[in-house]
Image (spheres, rainbow, N blue to C red):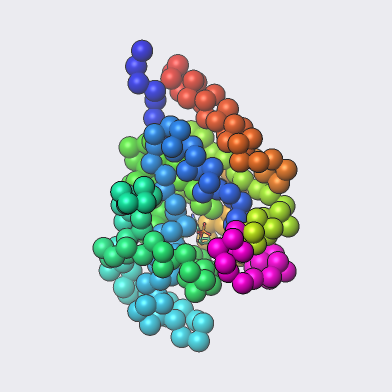
Amino acid sequence: MGAAPLINIAVDGFSSCGKSTLAKQLAQRLGYTYIDSGAMYRAVALYVIENGLVHDGRLDREGLLSRLDAIRIQFTHDPGTGRSTTLLNGRNVERRIRGMDVSRHVTLVSPVPEVRAKLVRLQQEMGRGKGVVMDGRDIGTVVFPDAEVKLYMTARPEVRARRRYDELKARGVEVDYASVLENIERRDEDDTKRAADPLIKAPDAVEIDNSDIDREQQFDLAMKVVSGVLAKVGME
Ligand code: DC
Protein backbone atom coordinates (compact mmCIF):
# COMPACT_ATOMS: atom_id res chain seq x y z
CA MET A 1 0.00 0.00 0.00
CA GLY A 2 1.38 3.46 -0.89
CA ALA A 3 1.51 6.42 1.49
CA ALA A 4 -1.71 8.39 1.96
CA PRO A 5 -1.99 11.20 -0.60
CA LEU A 6 -1.25 14.72 0.65
CA ILE A 7 -3.93 17.34 0.26
CA ASN A 8 -4.50 20.94 1.36
CA ILE A 9 -7.35 21.83 3.69
CA ALA A 10 -8.82 25.34 3.80
CA VAL A 11 -10.77 26.37 6.91
CA ASP A 12 -12.56 29.70 6.52
CA GLY A 13 -15.13 31.46 8.62
CA PHE A 14 -16.08 34.31 10.89
CA SER A 15 -14.12 35.50 13.93
CA SER A 16 -14.36 33.37 17.08
CA CYS A 17 -15.88 30.46 15.22
CA GLY A 18 -13.47 27.82 16.45
CA LYS A 19 -11.58 27.69 13.15
CA SER A 20 -8.14 27.38 14.70
CA THR A 21 -9.29 24.69 17.15
CA LEU A 22 -10.62 22.55 14.31
CA ALA A 23 -7.69 23.29 11.99
CA LYS A 24 -5.18 22.29 14.69
CA GLN A 25 -7.10 19.09 15.48
CA LEU A 26 -7.13 18.13 11.80
CA ALA A 27 -3.43 18.91 11.36
CA GLN A 28 -2.54 16.82 14.40
CA ARG A 29 -4.64 13.83 13.32
CA LEU A 30 -3.25 13.89 9.78
CA GLY A 31 0.36 14.83 10.65
CA TYR A 32 -0.05 18.00 8.56
CA THR A 33 1.26 21.53 9.14
CA TYR A 34 -1.18 24.01 10.66
CA ILE A 35 -0.88 27.59 9.41
CA ASP A 36 -2.69 30.49 11.05
CA SER A 37 -3.03 33.06 8.25
CA GLY A 38 -4.59 35.60 10.65
CA ALA A 39 -1.27 35.68 12.55
CA MET A 40 0.38 37.06 9.42
CA TYR A 41 -2.08 39.97 9.18
CA ARG A 42 -1.59 40.52 12.90
CA ALA A 43 2.21 40.65 12.42
CA VAL A 44 1.81 43.37 9.76
CA ALA A 45 -0.45 45.29 12.18
CA LEU A 46 2.26 45.04 14.84
CA TYR A 47 4.85 46.30 12.35
CA VAL A 48 2.80 49.45 11.59
CA ILE A 49 2.25 50.11 15.30
CA GLU A 50 5.93 49.72 16.17
CA ASN A 51 7.18 51.74 13.21
CA GLY A 52 5.05 54.84 13.73
CA LEU A 53 2.87 54.18 10.70
CA VAL A 54 -0.40 54.90 12.52
CA HIS A 55 -1.37 58.49 13.32
CA ASP A 56 -4.60 59.25 15.20
CA GLY A 57 -5.93 55.83 14.31
CA ARG A 58 -5.17 56.30 10.60
CA LEU A 59 -2.74 54.20 8.61
CA ASP A 60 0.16 55.89 6.80
CA ARG A 61 -0.51 53.81 3.73
CA GLU A 62 2.31 55.22 1.60
CA GLY A 63 4.74 54.62 4.45
CA LEU A 64 3.59 51.02 4.75
CA LEU A 65 3.79 50.39 1.00
CA SER A 66 7.32 51.79 0.82
CA ARG A 67 8.43 49.37 3.57
CA LEU A 68 6.45 46.32 2.59
CA ASP A 69 9.56 44.53 1.31
CA ALA A 70 11.22 45.00 4.70
CA ILE A 71 8.51 43.00 6.49
CA ARG A 72 9.54 39.36 6.89
CA ILE A 73 7.09 36.92 8.43
CA GLN A 74 7.96 33.32 9.29
CA PHE A 75 6.68 30.52 11.50
CA THR A 76 8.84 28.23 13.62
CA HIS A 77 8.03 25.38 15.92
CA ASP A 78 8.55 26.16 19.60
CA PRO A 79 9.74 22.90 21.22
CA GLY A 80 9.02 24.38 24.67
CA THR A 81 5.30 24.94 24.12
CA GLY A 82 4.93 22.46 21.25
CA ARG A 83 3.25 25.25 19.34
CA SER A 84 3.86 27.24 16.22
CA THR A 85 5.47 30.63 16.80
CA THR A 86 5.14 33.72 14.62
CA LEU A 87 8.35 35.61 13.82
CA LEU A 88 8.41 39.22 12.59
CA ASN A 89 11.80 40.04 11.10
CA GLY A 90 13.29 37.21 13.12
CA ARG A 91 11.70 38.23 16.46
CA ASN A 92 9.22 36.04 18.32
CA VAL A 93 5.97 38.07 18.38
CA GLU A 94 3.56 35.22 19.11
CA ARG A 95 2.26 36.65 22.39
CA ARG A 96 2.43 40.27 21.30
CA ILE A 97 0.19 39.82 18.23
CA ARG A 98 -2.65 38.42 20.38
CA GLY A 99 -2.98 41.69 22.34
CA MET A 100 -5.97 44.00 22.07
CA ASP A 101 -4.03 46.83 20.38
CA VAL A 102 -3.05 44.51 17.54
CA SER A 103 -6.65 43.22 17.29
CA ARG A 104 -7.83 46.81 16.98
CA HIS A 105 -5.26 47.76 14.31
CA VAL A 106 -5.44 44.67 12.14
CA THR A 107 -8.44 45.92 10.15
CA LEU A 108 -6.33 48.93 9.09
CA VAL A 109 -3.89 46.66 7.24
CA SER A 110 -5.99 43.63 6.19
CA PRO A 111 -7.98 45.51 3.49
CA VAL A 112 -4.85 46.89 1.77
CA PRO A 113 -4.55 44.99 -1.56
CA GLU A 114 -0.72 45.14 -1.60
CA VAL A 115 -0.57 43.62 1.90
CA ARG A 116 -2.96 40.87 0.87
CA ALA A 117 -1.00 40.16 -2.32
CA LYS A 118 2.23 39.76 -0.34
CA LEU A 119 0.71 37.50 2.31
CA VAL A 120 -1.30 35.42 -0.17
CA ARG A 121 1.91 34.77 -2.14
CA LEU A 122 3.68 33.62 1.04
CA GLN A 123 0.73 31.42 2.02
CA GLN A 124 0.66 29.83 -1.43
CA GLU A 125 4.38 29.04 -1.15
CA MET A 126 3.76 27.37 2.21
CA GLY A 127 1.09 25.16 0.65
CA ARG A 128 2.99 24.25 -2.48
CA GLY A 129 4.12 20.86 -1.14
CA LYS A 130 0.59 20.10 0.19
CA GLY A 131 -0.06 18.63 3.63
CA VAL A 132 -1.22 21.98 5.01
CA VAL A 133 -4.28 22.97 7.04
CA MET A 134 -4.67 26.75 6.85
CA ASP A 135 -7.36 28.83 8.50
CA GLY A 136 -8.47 32.33 7.60
CA ARG A 137 -11.09 34.19 5.59
CA ASP A 138 -10.04 33.77 1.96
CA ILE A 139 -8.18 30.46 1.97
CA GLY A 140 -10.68 28.44 -0.07
CA THR A 141 -11.48 31.32 -2.41
CA VAL A 142 -8.15 33.09 -3.04
CA VAL A 143 -5.15 31.36 -1.43
CA PHE A 144 -5.93 27.72 -2.33
CA PRO A 145 -8.84 27.82 -4.80
CA ASP A 146 -7.84 24.22 -5.67
CA ALA A 147 -7.76 22.94 -2.06
CA GLU A 148 -9.06 19.38 -1.98
CA VAL A 149 -11.07 20.10 1.18
CA LYS A 150 -12.75 23.43 1.97
CA LEU A 151 -14.60 23.93 5.23
CA TYR A 152 -16.67 27.03 5.94
CA MET A 153 -17.44 27.50 9.61
CA THR A 154 -20.29 29.48 11.06
CA ALA A 155 -22.08 29.90 14.37
CA ARG A 156 -24.70 32.34 15.59
CA PRO A 157 -23.08 35.64 16.74
CA GLU A 158 -24.54 35.26 20.27
CA VAL A 159 -22.98 31.80 20.60
CA ARG A 160 -19.59 33.06 19.41
CA ALA A 161 -19.77 36.05 21.75
CA ARG A 162 -20.60 33.81 24.70
CA ARG A 163 -17.63 31.51 23.95
CA ARG A 164 -15.25 34.44 23.51
CA TYR A 165 -16.58 36.10 26.68
CA ASP A 166 -16.06 32.88 28.70
CA GLU A 167 -12.57 32.50 27.24
CA LEU A 168 -11.57 36.08 28.14
CA LYS A 169 -13.07 35.76 31.63
CA ALA A 170 -11.16 32.53 32.19
CA ARG A 171 -7.97 34.43 31.33
CA GLY A 172 -8.88 37.06 33.90
CA VAL A 173 -9.72 39.79 31.35
CA GLU A 174 -12.39 42.25 32.53
CA VAL A 175 -15.03 42.47 29.78
CA ASP A 176 -18.77 42.70 29.43
CA TYR A 177 -20.78 40.43 27.17
CA ALA A 178 -22.47 43.27 25.25
CA SER A 179 -19.18 44.77 24.09
CA VAL A 180 -17.82 41.35 23.08
CA LEU A 181 -20.95 40.78 20.97
CA GLU A 182 -20.68 44.24 19.45
CA ASN A 183 -17.00 43.65 18.52
CA ILE A 184 -17.86 40.32 16.89
CA GLU A 185 -20.69 41.86 14.86
CA ARG A 186 -18.43 44.72 13.75
CA ARG A 187 -15.70 42.33 12.64
CA ASP A 188 -18.26 40.19 10.75
CA GLU A 189 -19.26 43.34 8.93
CA ASP A 190 -15.61 44.31 8.20
CA ASP A 191 -14.72 40.81 6.99
CA THR A 192 -17.70 40.36 4.68
CA LYS A 193 -18.01 43.88 3.28
CA ARG A 194 -14.40 44.75 2.44
CA ALA A 195 -13.59 45.09 -1.27
CA ALA A 196 -10.39 42.98 -1.27
CA ASP A 197 -10.88 39.24 -0.71
CA PRO A 198 -13.96 39.42 1.54
CA LEU A 199 -15.12 36.44 3.56
CA ILE A 200 -17.45 34.44 1.32
CA LYS A 201 -18.25 30.77 1.16
CA ALA A 202 -16.54 29.05 -1.77
CA PRO A 203 -19.15 27.25 -3.88
CA ASP A 204 -17.45 23.91 -3.21
CA ALA A 205 -16.97 24.45 0.55
CA VAL A 206 -18.74 22.30 3.12
CA GLU A 207 -20.46 24.47 5.71
CA ILE A 208 -20.26 23.49 9.37
CA ASP A 209 -22.52 25.42 11.74
CA ASN A 210 -21.22 24.64 15.21
CA SER A 211 -23.78 26.66 17.20
CA ASP A 212 -25.32 23.53 18.68
CA ILE A 213 -22.57 20.94 18.52
CA ASP A 214 -19.43 20.43 20.58
CA ARG A 215 -15.76 20.20 19.51
CA GLU A 216 -15.75 16.43 19.17
CA GLN A 217 -18.89 16.38 17.03
CA GLN A 218 -17.45 19.13 14.87
CA PHE A 219 -14.16 17.24 14.49
CA ASP A 220 -16.01 14.04 13.54
CA LEU A 221 -18.01 15.90 10.90
CA ALA A 222 -14.88 17.46 9.42
CA MET A 223 -12.94 14.16 9.49
CA LYS A 224 -15.77 12.47 7.55
CA VAL A 225 -15.37 15.06 4.82
CA VAL A 226 -11.56 14.72 4.84
CA SER A 227 -11.61 10.90 4.84
CA GLY A 228 -14.03 10.87 1.93
CA VAL A 229 -11.77 13.14 -0.10
CA LEU A 230 -8.58 11.22 0.85
CA ALA A 231 -10.17 7.96 -0.24
CA LYS A 232 -11.20 9.50 -3.56
CA VAL A 233 -7.84 11.18 -4.21
CA GLY A 234 -6.05 7.92 -3.33
CA MET A 235 -8.02 6.07 -6.01
CA GLU A 236 -7.23 8.52 -8.80
O1 DC B 1 -8.21 35.00 12.45
P1 DC B 1 -7.78 36.29 13.20
O2 DC B 1 -8.90 36.92 14.00
O3 DC B 1 -6.53 36.10 13.99
O4 DC B 1 -7.44 37.31 12.03
C1 DC B 1 -6.96 38.59 12.30
C2 DC B 1 -7.49 39.56 11.26
O5 DC B 1 -6.92 39.30 9.98
C3 DC B 1 -9.00 39.57 11.10
O6 DC B 1 -9.44 40.90 11.27
C4 DC B 1 -9.25 39.16 9.68
C5 DC B 1 -7.92 39.25 8.98
N1 DC B 1 -7.67 38.10 8.13
C6 DC B 1 -7.82 38.26 6.78
O7 DC B 1 -8.21 39.33 6.32
N2 DC B 1 -7.54 37.21 5.93
C7 DC B 1 -7.12 36.05 6.42
N3 DC B 1 -6.85 35.04 5.59
C8 DC B 1 -6.98 35.86 7.81
C9 DC B 1 -7.26 36.92 8.65
Identify the residue at image location x=28%, y=69%.
70
Q: Is residue 188 visible?
A: no
Q: Position of residue 64 (x, y in %)?
A: 37, 74
Q: Nearer the viewer, residue 215 or 123?
A: 215
Q: Is residue 68 left or right of residue 212?
A: left
Q: Quadrant of the N terminus?
A: top left
Report the residue that reaches farthest toward the bottom: 56
- Decide which of 154, 95 is in the foreground and name it: 95
Residue at 64% over, 59% down: 166
- 36 up-or-down from 64: above or below: above
Residue at the location (44% across, 81% down)? 54
Examine the image and state in which quarter residue 92 appears: bottom left
Give the magenta-colored segment's residue range. 167-184
Q: Residue 185, how many percent across, how many down?
A: 68, 64
Q: Can you say whether 188 is above or below 140 in the image? A: below
Instruction: Report the predominant secondary structure element of the magenta stretch.
Output: helix
- In reply to whether residue 160 is colored magenta, the answer given is no
Q: Nearer the viewer, residue 60 or 169?
A: 169
Q: Is residue 175 magenta?
A: yes
Estimate the x, y position of residue 147 in percent, counting from the top left. Answer: 47, 37
Choose between 18 and 185: the one closer to the eye: 18
* Residue at screen point 53% across, 56% down: 197
Viewer can see residue 66: yes
